[in-house]
Structure formats: C-alpha cells, structure tokens
Amino acid sequence: MHTPPTSPPTTAESPSDAVLTFWLGDALKSDWPEQSRNDLWFGGGAAQDQLVTQQFGHLVDEALAGGLTEWESSLDQRLALIIVLDQFTRNVHRGKAQAFAGDTRAQQLVLRTLAQDEDKALPRVARVFLYMPLMHAEHLALQEACVAHFTELAENAPPELRETLNGNLKFALQHRDIVAAYGRFPYRNESMGRENTTEEAEFLKNGPRFGQ
C-alpha cells in the first residue's frame, strides 16, 4: 500500500505550524508542493485516520469545543485552524455526525478571511484548502461563492497548475449542483441521522459521492 507523503512536526514547531507542515509540507513557501500529496488530501483510509488522530486528535477536540481562538488572529494560524476544523475532523470522526461538526465555524473563518481580502496573500495550494469549507457547505450561497473562487484560481493558474486547478473547479461545480438540487448532500444523510427523500434515494443509487 502506498503511504501518502507527510511531513512530521519538528520539536521547534508550534502546534499551528505542525498542522500546516503535515498538510501542506513546504507549500506555504511556494504555490504547490513539489511532491504529490493527493493521497494524503483525498485518499482517506484507516491508516491515515489513525495518523491524524494520533498527532492532531487533541486539536480537533479543542477546536470543536470552541477553543484555539488565539489561532484566529493571524492568517497562517487561521488557515491551520480551518484545516483542523474542515479536514482533520473528517479523519478523526469518519462516518459520524461529528465529522461535520467543525464545518460552520470553518466557514465563518473563511468568510472573515475573504471579507478582509486576505486570501490573495496565500499561495495557491493554501487557497484551495482555505476555500474547501465552502465546497463542504450545505448552503447554496456558500457553494456559489466557492465556485467563484475556484473559477478565479483556475483562470489565473500558471500552465503547470492549470489541469489541477481546473479539476478543483470541476469538483466545486459538482458540489454546487448537488446542493442546488437537494439543498444538502444526500450521501451525508446516514451519518447525520437524516431520512432520505424519494429523490435523494434515487440519487444515491448512481449519483456521485465526495468524501463523506
């Protein structure tokens, strides 16, 4: 089994820096990691869930309890908090409603960052994960905002990132279309204890699924 590349925290790193190093590697110094991290970002699996839980489960617990507010002030720390709330929650609580418990706070932090026009200060890969909570939102206005930001990223991509960022835009459009059709993600219903509508049950037979 291929093991996704990770960057273990060093003893000198702060907890927020450890999150960014683990998830993005050295990408805050450049537009994109030199080594593919797609298995880490999108692969999932029990081994990865265990790794994230061991290294960052305590931060997930603290963030879901409303803590780590000191991370909200600076852009880099806020990005780390967004990753904890929007990505690590899905590893630590896979298949449970708690996997989505950080979404609202993550989305609020994203909107705050956008309102301050701070997203443009980040490299492209960091912007992808800054915008990702909008892609996870069961709210059409946030989905439309997500599409707008991923469209901008794709349209302004350098040649070497064009295919990757166009792929992100494709996923943003697919997420938007699902929420436009159903008002939520039907494939979350089981984890969330929600009953499927007739239309959702039909969608779940053949429709696309993303993550959880």
Image: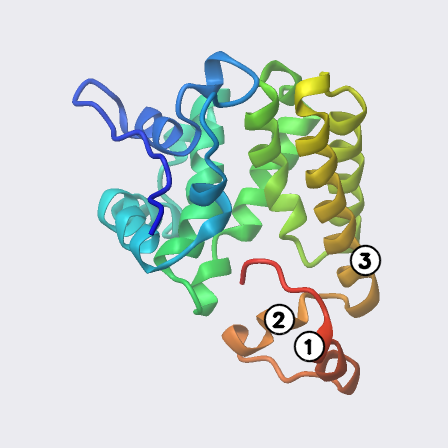
Q: Nearer the viewer, residue 63 or 51?
A: 51
Q: Amino acid at mark 1?
A: Leu
Q: Classify mark 3: helix, strand or loop.
A: helix
Q: Position of 79 compared to 112: left or right?
A: left
Q: Which residue is mark 3?
A: 177
Mark 3 in CB contact with mark 1 (< 8 angstroms): no
User: In the image, what residue occupies the spot 54% across and 22% down?
Assistant: 32
Q: Secondary structure at mark 2?
A: helix
- Amino acid type at mark 2: Tyr
Residue 101 appears at what percent x and percent y?
48, 58
Mark 1 vs mark 2, CA separation in Å: 7 Å
Disc 1 to disc 2: CB gap under 8 Å: yes
- Tell which circle, 1 or 2, labels the residue nearer the N-terminal end: 2
Q: Residue at x 71, y 16 (%)?
A: 158
Residue that numbered label 2 is attached to? 187
Residue 205: % across, % down: 69, 80
Mark number, residue 204: 1
Amino acid type at circle 3 is Asp
Q: Is residue 117 visible?
A: no
